[in-house]
Image (spheres, rainbow, N blue to C red):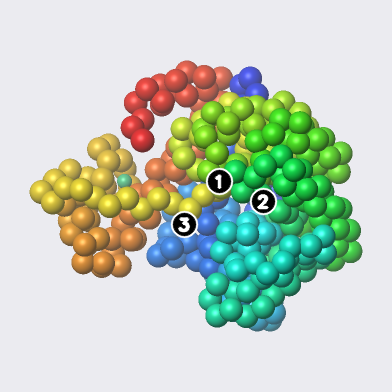
Amino acid sequence: MFTIEKTDGRARTGIVHTPHGSFKTPAFMPCGTKGAVKTLTPDELKTLGCEIILGNTYHLMIRPGEELIQKLGGLRKWSGWNGPILTDSGGFQVFSLGAIRRITDEGVEFRSHVDGTPYFLTPERSIDIQLKLGSDIIMAFDECAPADSDYEYAKCAMERTHTWLNRSIEQFNYSKTEGNMLFGIIQGVIFDDLRQTSTNFVAEKNLAGIAIGGLSVGESKSAMYHTLQIVSERVPQDKPLYLMGVGAPEDIVHAVLLGVDMFDCVLPIKNQKYTDDAEPLQKECACFSCLRFSKSYIRHLCMENEMLSHRLMTIHNLHFLLDFMRKIRQAIEKKSFEHFKANFLKSFKI
Ligand SMILES: [Zn+2]
């Protein structure tokens, strides 16, 4: 269930309620790709202000397998994270990591990138895996066409995504338990009419939430913003809107202004350049890493491949993004989001 709290133009704050707790929006969801957010414990995530994490169906189905996780109480109990979880459908990783053998209307035949084991992933199987993992927010199985797809292929992938959405809904309704939410995914690459068609198709299904897929996959920023505009004008306003795989701060502020509520992305780990810099990673950052350690020290740890360097940088990156979302929510509450966005873009160096 989604409650909108405050609005400022099309930007809004809200709360998504799940059986395992609620989270405030606009929200950033750290990726617990293989069952863990890299180097951090669930308690550390909570301390940083994280309220929901994302799990990857593709990685978990390959290792250790959803049956084992289900037997051990589901992803939440198994990994020690007791808050809300969103799982992706596996589609995106199949298309980007797996050695694809065949895509048919039935599903995708591929080999694991780990050991070459063959798999066949269908909308029904994806929904079942996500339910076995114990996910709260389940994503429909989709085909994410590459950014440079021609119109014909983009249309074909979109139509397949729509057929797969119908099958995902049927399977979800058959197997769901109390409180599970299903999100449909809008595709269509960067073609306006396809995005419009796809938005209308997904909107008509009256699902718990709507996601925008296939952006930030190599298209230009202006094309991405244009597509976002086309989609955001047409989605129902009372559903949470999730922009998949987008987590650059300048893109987040842009999307929030258009009414996007949820974000995720793999955190960037930048190499530090300076050997003699006594300053923290970021001046005035209040995270544990910046309060205690210099750039010089963290760079040294990186060069030596010390595990602590990954921890310190993950803590800093997550603190930055979660704090950024908090500030975004405050600016919306004060009806000063446009001002916040302009100030942020002026001062933020990419
Ligand atoms: Zn910091």
Type of the residue with mark 2: Cys
In which image quadrant can residue 47 be found?
Answer: bottom left
Q: Is mark 1 within 8 Å of ligand 1?
A: no
Residue at horizontal 71 percent and vertical 44 percent from the top: 154
Asked whether disc 1 touches disc 2, contact meaning CB atoms under 8 Å apart, the reply is yes
Q: Which residue is mark 3?
A: 45
Type of the residue with mark 1: Val
Left or right: where does residue 216 sit relative to residue 183? left
Q: Which residue is mark 1?
A: 217
Q: Position of residue 50 (x, y in %)?
A: 51, 51
Secondary structure, mark 2, is loop
In which image quadrant can residue 225 be found?
Answer: top right
Question: Between residues 175 and 105, which one lies in front from this camera angle?
Answer: 105
Mark 2 vs mark 3: which is more N-terminal?
3
Question: Between residues 221 and 242, which one lies in front from this camera angle?
Answer: 221
Q: Position of residue 306 (x, y in %)?
A: 26, 67
Residue at horizontal 36 percent and vertical 30 percent from the top: 348
Number of callouts: 3
Q: Is mark 3 within 8 Å of ligand 1?
A: no
Tag of residue 144:
2
Q: Nearer the viewer, mark 1 or mark 3?
A: 1
Residue at horizontal 74 percent and vertical 62 percent from the top: 103
* Mark 1 to mark 2 CA distance (whole Å): 9 Å
